[in-house]
Image (cartoon, rainbow, N blue to C red):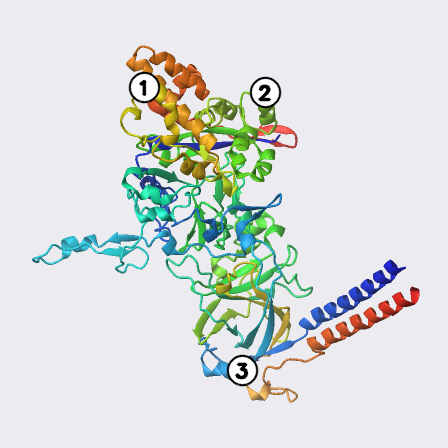
Amino acid sequence: MRVRAQVVMVMNLDKCIGCHTCSITCKNTWLKREGMEYVWWNNVETRPGPGYPRRWEDQDRYNGGWALEGRKLRLRIEVKGEYRPPALEDYYHPWTYDYERLFSAQQFDVQPAARPISLVTGEPVDVEWGPNWNDDLAGTDLIDEDSNWAGLQREVYKQYRDVFMMYLPRICNHCLFPSCLYACPRKAIYKREEDGIVLVDQERCRGYRYCVSACPYKKVYYNWKSGKSEKCIFCYPRIEVGQPTVCSETCVGKIRYLGVLLYDDDAVEDVAREPDPRNIVPRFLDEVILDPTDPRVVEGARKAGIADAWLEAARVSPVYKIVKRWRVAFPLHPEFRTMPMLFYVPPLSPVITEGEKALGAKVSDLFPLVEEMRIPVRYLANMFTAGNEELVVGALKKLIALRAYERSLNVRRPGEAEAARKLLSEAGLTERDAEEMYRLFALARYHERFVIPTARKKVTVKGIGIVRP
Amino acid sequence: MRRVSLLAVLLAALVGIAVSMSAVVVTAQVPEVAVKYVEGAIPLDPNSPTWADVQGVDVQLASQALVYPVAPTAESRTLLVRALHNGTHVAFYLEWSDDTRDVAAPGVLDTFPDAVAIQFPTRLGQLPYICMGMVDNPVNIIYWKAGVGAENLVAGAGYGLSPEQRDALGLARSPVSPVELLPPNAQVVTAVATYAQGTWRVVMVRPTASVHPLMAQLVPGQPISTAFAVWDGSKGERGGLKATSGWISFVLEAAAVPTPETRPVTETVPGPAKVVEVTPTWAWAAIGVLIAVIALLLGLLLGRRQT
């Protein structure tokens, strides 16, 4: 066992309101630079939909991530011999408006217009596509470009009655087995030992863009001005001093959580090579993510030089509770096999069936309805568990049981408390779990959502344990 | 018995191949190109008639062997090289055909620019490793990239120098890459490029004198080894994906002496650039193949006699 620690994010999609504040604040903080106009390290996608860049999940098109050949993992760009990164049109042509004209135009019978202007060339452009073009356009033909329809009849979800939508905020997943890192022939990408953040060394990078092609999430971007590639830096200057990332700090819905996860580096590659993709997430949670209260893990962590402050942070980590203890959050597209270290709590959604079966009906009716929720379980499973519906159902049942339990505490109808407790235990939660979950998900105090240690890792030099200044 | 004879055949074939290969490598170094001296300014425009009059040399380039992450295009190309110097500067005229014009431009994310580079040893004596030098024997590279411009680079030196030495050389204290940009005061390379009818024509000019300890010094009369590389962006070539040549030797002709009175009687007027022909590459290859065939036959014969 080789214990390592990483600062990890969880996003509770139930609470995302699709306001894009995360994207805007990230953009304002890091990306107001020439060459990066089209870049959104953080973006929010309306799903089902094509995403940004357009159809990024379609690896037949973009060749990202790892391909399993027998028991060997090979980069898909290598297998396909395909090198071309996405073009600007795959993202979108960034634009602004000619605001100046609104004031400088001569007085005339008609209102002056602010034409869209290219942020690249400064010339007028026709705006034909954007980073979230299908915002709130559930049920339109654009849902055809979503890649998560396996096992579902997408035509059904264009029907008025069955339309559904959800938001998917995305940043770099700071993977444990990052294909961008392995694709770089110059070794310009590295995963920080101390906190797991994956960075592109701007000194080493020469803009070959293998990483851009190899990242299955298309979260490495080419800066055409500097001729180098850049990616989300997980706001490391903030993390280092115990502050949350800008996207987390400014999240209106308070959907983001930050905390330490300990993981076994020796188990990562083996799990990434799991033949059945549906087993990747269970094995990820069981074999890779470690229990910070396990004495063997603590010993391994100490041996690896992980500071006590980090171990303490791991023990009270909100991320650990959500991901491993309650198992209600999953990585995005584990089948890309990069072992992403960012987890999503799948969203609950209104039930399709109306009337007496809707949420708010008899508690005992709530359970069977998980499969009848507006967002098909299969769709969520295709997105977060490589098709493993059991995991998604398990998580949704917990979330519903939690709601039923909290409701029972407030409504106090005869028999409801017993029924709610029964639901909890069937979902595999104790009342204490439910209270903790409620506190973390609903009340979400700042310092409970963000538990970020600042102490540096101990580095052993010639057998003497010293702390790097 | 059969195994022994098979082994003999194999061994013989290997020896043959090795002989033929070593021969090819040797001949790749032999051509020696004379760089004509011209008085005054050297034309920067590749389309200037001056360049058309300069005798050129066809440099053979082959795709660099590389397997990861993307296999290279297996092909050979020809780079036409012409060179002139005026005492202070040396100019290389480089011409090669490329069906597509791939140029870096604002907002262009999926184009890899076409490029060309010339590599020089940083000092005389033992030739450095041709694949961008070594720690104890670095190379100086002048590099032009379409839409980006010319750079003066050093390769191989980085890891062989102490932080103090690197400081003194104007490089970052710790090396970040095997290829590094020389400091701004050593960015003395200029390039002018044109593209027409599927052909790139690039003139790259650098001072003959070195302006940095890690830059090659070109002294008239002394042979200087150079190697060339070309990148075809439309084939996804960048970084190690490129076509490279072997070492080609150039000699800068001595500057014309200003007054005829002091001109020695024996001096001849500088002739046109010429390639000194030794045994050509193809001949060595043919000899190698012949040896291999003979060895193979011998091996077979031996094998048959033993059985």
The mark nearer the N terminus, 1 or 2, is 2
Q: Where does label 2 land, which residue?
A: A295
Q: Secondary structure at mark 3?
A: loop
Pointer 3 with pointer 2, Cβ within 8 A: no
Q: Is residue A127 above or below residue B102?
A: above
Residue at position x 68%, y 65% from top? B125
- 1 vs 2, front mark: 1
Nearer-the-camera pick, B265 or A461: A461
Q: Which mark is residue A362?
A: 1
- 3 vs 2, front mark: 2
Q: Is residue A178 left or right of residue B66?
A: left
Q: Is residue B13 above or below residue A234?
A: below
Residue at position x 56%, y 82% from top? B55
What whole-number distance in Å separates the C-alpha atoms at marks 1 and 2?
44 Å
Q: Where does label 3 land, which residue?
A: B54
Looking at this view, name the residue that lies furthest to the left.
A109
